[in-house]
Amino acid sequence: MSTRRRARRTGNGRRRALVLLGLAVAFLAGIGLGEALNDGPDPGGGQTIVRTLLPGPLPPVSAETGTAPHANR
């Protein structure tokens, strides 16, 4: 009979150890997630401004067309 009690205790001890290990992992994961969210940038820290620029007046086009004279001729 004592062997059955020992077997139950060992299984019970393993189960408790696994439950405690699972809780510890979940706790550490929660701390890691909380720190990661806390390290994020503050919302509303910057502002983006978009402006549309209108084209200015263009210089008049010259009536002369052709190529530029070569200096070596």
Image (cartoon, grey):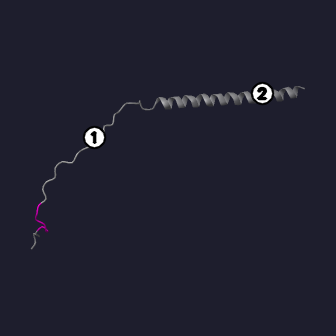
Looking at the image, which is closer to me, 31 or 14?
Answer: 31
Query: What amino acid is at disc 1?
Result: Arg
Report which residue position mark 2 lands on: 12
* Residue 8 placement (x, y as % from top left): 82, 28
- Quadrant housing the C terminus: bottom left
Of 59 and 17, the residue lying toward us: 59
Which mark identifies residue 51? 1
Residue at image coords 33%, 37%: 48
How far across and how far down the image is residue 66, in percent?
Answer: 13, 68
Mark 2 and mark 1: span between their CA atoms?
Answer: 70 Å
**Extent of the magenta region:** 62-68
Q: Which mark is residue 24?
A: none
Residues at discs 2 and 1 in contact (Cβ within 8 Å): no
Q: Residue at x 62, y 30 (%)?
A: 26
Few, some or many C-alpha atoms within 10 Å of disc 1 (few <14, some 14-19, many ≥20)? few
Q: Quadrant of the N terminus?
A: top right
Residue 64 within the segment the image draws in magenta: yes
Using residue 25 as the reference point, say whether residue 41 is left or right of it: left
25 magenta-colored = no
Q: Looking at the picture, does residue 66 appear above or below residue 7?
A: below
Q: Secondary structure at mark 2?
A: helix
Decide if residue 17 is on the left or right side of residue 37.
Answer: right
Q: Is residue 48 left or right of residue 2?
A: left
Q: Judge left or right: residue 48 versus residue 28.
A: left
Residue located at (50% from left, 32% from top) = 36
73 is higher (above) or lower (below) than 17:
below
* Residue 41, position as x, y percentages in the image: 42, 32
Work out whether residue 61 or residue 28 is closer to the camera in this orientation and state it.
61
Q: Main secondary structure of the magenta part?
A: loop
Q: Secondary structure at mark 1?
A: loop
The answer to whether residue 11 is above or below residue 69 is above
